[in-house]
Amino acid sequence: MSKLHKDGLARDLEKMKNEGGLLLDAMGPHWRRWISKPWDGHAYTNLFVEAQRVSPYFMGHIDAVLLPVLVASLAFIVWVLL
């Protein structure tokens, strides 16, 4: 089905699915490197850097959800502890 026959949501979901597949394929070597050397800070950093490089659209959506959840969770924890 061509992009012309899809609404915005269907088009976006297809793009997310395609980029998610690209991400899974491309990140294998980086995960293996980090698993083999979990103390290597560069291998850990590469997980995030390479994921953003391979699939900025997909990771941007992940970040847009996870960052506010993280900030809200930290704010709640601080509020409970004080």
Image: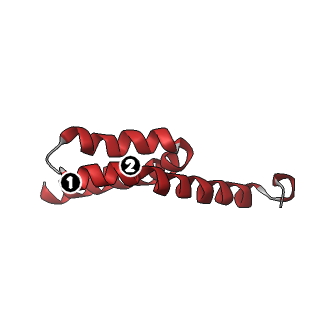
The structure residue drawn at horizontal position 62% and vertical position 56%, both measured from the top left corner, is 18
Secondary structure, mark 2, is helix
Q: Is residue 23 visible?
A: yes
What residue is disc 2 on? 67
The structure residue drawn at horizontal position 41% and vertical position 41%, both measured from the top left corner, is 50
Badge 2 crowding class, 10 Å Cα cut-off, few under 14, some 14 to 19, many 20 or more, is: few
The structure residue drawn at horizontal position 55% and vertical position 58%, both measured from the top left corner, is 21
Q: Residue 7 at x, y = what percent?
A: 79, 58
In the rendered view, does 36 fall on the left or right side of 50?
Answer: left
Residue kind at label 1, given as amino acid type: Ser
Q: Is residue 75 visible?
A: no
Q: Earlier in the sequence, mark 1 or mark 2?
A: 1
Q: Quadrant of the C terminus?
A: bottom left
Secondary structure, mark 1, is helix
What residue is disc 1 on? 36
Q: Quadrant of the N terminus?
A: bottom right
